[in-house]
Amino acid sequence: MTQGMPDSSGDRSARPDLSDMRPDDWVAHWLPESWGPYARICRLDRPVGTWLTLLPCLAALVQAAEGLPTLWRLVIFSLGALLMRGVGCTFNDIFDRDFDHRVERTRFRPLTSGQITLRNAIVFAIAQLLVCALLLWAINPYSRWLALGVVPLAVIYPLCKRFTYWPQVVLGIAFNWGMLMAWTDTRDILPWAAVAMWLGAVTWQVGYDAIYAYIDIRDDLMLGLRSAAMRFGDRGRLWIGGFYVATIVLWTAGGIGMGMHGPYYVVIAAIAVHFAWQMRVFDVRHPERGLRLFRANMLVGVMLIVAALAGTVMP
């Protein structure tokens, strides 16, 4: 079998409808018609990615606060996750507009289908960045400087698939950056254990985003784009399993470095079991399973928060 090519059982004709656009969703029912394309270009209609960005950040806030963080920080970091994910998705559609119209799953996205002009999409991306800039005044100077470092990563991520098989690494670095800022804003320090937790989130995201990338592997090959799924090929289960093992090791090391209590490691062990279940279900020959597994990682994010709470407030 050609590297990265599922067999005919994974052909898109055999998959469920994976179209990005749902004409009968809450955006269509509750927002003014003129707002809909903007809500969709920043993926407000599909919040899974926002949750996967926010949940590990919330876990970091809990660990840094050694318990419940302040309501103010919860609000600021939640808004930051929502906006930065929106910025990344908007730039993704701007850079990929000439590719999206050739892919069934993406050809009805607002920019490529003409619901938004390129000019308006760029203005909207800049507007989101300006709102993010306002949030900087709600955090300390250390965290402001740290926040500036993630902006170029969020912008260039969509371009990475043109020249590297590892765009998921850039995505993981950028979209888990809030974990580092949670520590610098709460404690004004960035200990090695916090970096270990962040690296664990990066390897976790490489794993689950590679699972999702298998859904698009045929289209990516046709368009000349690259992804971790293409690099892993038929050995996807081994590679992704390896990244998940690295995640458990890093989160365990981070917990030890922070002096987490015993219950923390019980929950981390439960996450390891969940990863094992994912690897049992995952099959490169059936990439259509990837959407279900991708969404299942929201449970991992929730469990990470539970682990952080258990490790700080329980004896």
Image (spheres, rainbow, N blue to C red):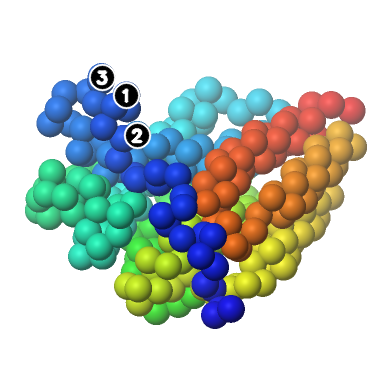
67 or 32, nearer to the observer: 32
Q: Closer to the N terminus: mark 2 or mark 1? A: 1
Q: Position of residue 312 (x, y in %)?
A: 78, 32
Horizontal side of residue 4 vs 196, given as left or right? left
**In this view, 153 is above or below 258:** below
Label number found at residue 45: 2
Residue shown at 23% from the left, 47% from the top:
108
Residue count near mark 1 (Cα–Cα under 10 Å), binned few <14, some 14–19, many ≥20: few
Q: Quadrant of residue 236?
A: bottom right
Q: SS class of the residue under badge 3?
A: helix
Q: SS class of the residue under badge 1?
A: helix
The residue identified by callout 1 is 26
Q: SS class of the residue under badge 2?
A: loop
The residue identified by callout 3 is 30
Residue 192 seen anywhere in this rendered image of the structure = no
- Give the amino acid at mark 3: Trp
**In this view, 75 is above or below 171:** above
Residue 128 seen anywhere in this rendered image of the structure = yes
Labelled pair 1, 3 in contact (Cβ < 8 Å): yes
Q: Position of residue 276 (x, y in %)?
A: 77, 51
**In this view, 132 is above or below 193:** above
